[in-house]
Image: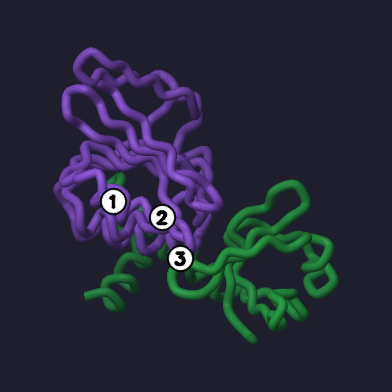
Chain colours: A green, B purple
Amino acid sequence: MKTTACLDAINNGYARLTYGEGGREQIDVRLTTLSKYIPEKLEEGEILELTISDSKEVVDAQRLVEETERRRRRLKALIDWLAYGIYSDGLGELNKENV
Amino acid sequence: MFRIHFLDVGRGDSIILQFENGRTYLIDSNEISGKVTPFDYLRKIKVVELETVVATHLHTDHLLGLQRIIESIPNRQVWLNEYNYIPNEAYENFLLALRNEPDIRIYFPHSAMKVIEGKDRLQVLAPPPNLLYSNYFF
């Protein structure tokens, strides 16, 4: 199965990946397993394209850099607006999508 | 009587504080199949209003379900921790739900903060107040 996942947390050599509706599917994968496919340093919040086998083993992965940056912009815009009343372009993008 | 409910949500945690003065706080939420959801548990114990929803940090296993709770159960305030900022979908959905509830106040509590609820006191332990927003974001 090919899916888009978020590298939600890094703990003790494991990466917690979330995917599915709202991140409802949560699996832990060894970072060394991911590094077979993505040798660069990974950070929490990165969006990955995963291929997962029937036994929930990650058999391929790649970074989705643009999607990660897009989500970072959206969230920064949201938190700026909600907490500090600061309007930014990212919020305009969100407003168009969530009227 | 002050009550604490620790829910088994599989990963992460979810804790409900019920103060003697009748106010209820929810700390974190996760929803995994086969486990009770905090949303359902709040209904089961007949909580119809929350004083505070606390998102201790922004990993999905501490956030999942808060969107539904914000949308369904009236609550007065949300405590967020901005110092662990992760752009996951659960966080985005949670913030979008908050955007639609302008009466909910948002706070970033820190370790100098104490809350008095009747004869009970709540002490925030972290993060220290010298960690400023501007030091963290980009």
Residue B16 at what x, y percent from top left? 34, 37
The span from disc 2 to disc 3 (Cα, nearest Å) is 21 Å
Residue A94 at what x, y percent from top left? 32, 71
Binning the other alpha carbons within 10 Å of mark 3 as few (below 14), some (14 to 19) or many (20 upward) gives many
Among the two numbered marks 2 and 3 on one chain, the one whose residue lies closer to the N terminus = 2
Residue beneath disc 1: A82
Binning the other alpha carbons within 10 Å of mark 1 as few (below 14), some (14 to 19) or many (20 upward) gives some
Q: In this view, does B41 lie to the left or right of A17?
A: left
Callout in the foreground (2, 3): 2
Q: Residue type at mark 2: give it.
A: Val
Q: Is residue A20 left or right of residue A36?
A: left
Q: Residue type at mark 1: give it.
A: Leu
Callout in the foreground (2, 1): 2
Task: Tell me which chain the residue with mark 3 is part of.
Answer: B
Task: Tell me which chain the residue with mark 1 is part of.
Answer: A
Q: Which of B42 and B120 is in front in this view?
A: B42
Binning the other alpha carbons within 10 Å of mark 2 as few (below 14), some (14 to 19) or many (20 upward) gives some
Is mark 3 in CB contact (under 8 Å) with mark 1? no
Task: Tell me which chain the residue with mark 2 is part of.
Answer: B
Is mark 2 in CB contact (under 8 Å) with mark 3? no
Residue sticking out furthest to the bottom? A1
Q: Is residue A12 left or right of residue B138?
A: right
Residues behind callouts 3 and 1 on a single chain: no
Residue beneath disc 3: B89
Residue A19 figure quarter: bottom right
Residue B27 at what x, y percent from top left? 38, 40
Residue A90 at what x, y percent from top left? 37, 66
Callout in the foreground (3, 1): 3
Residue beneath disc 2: B36
**Element at label 3:** helix
**Element at label 1:** helix
Is mark 2 in CB contact (under 8 Å) with mark 1? no
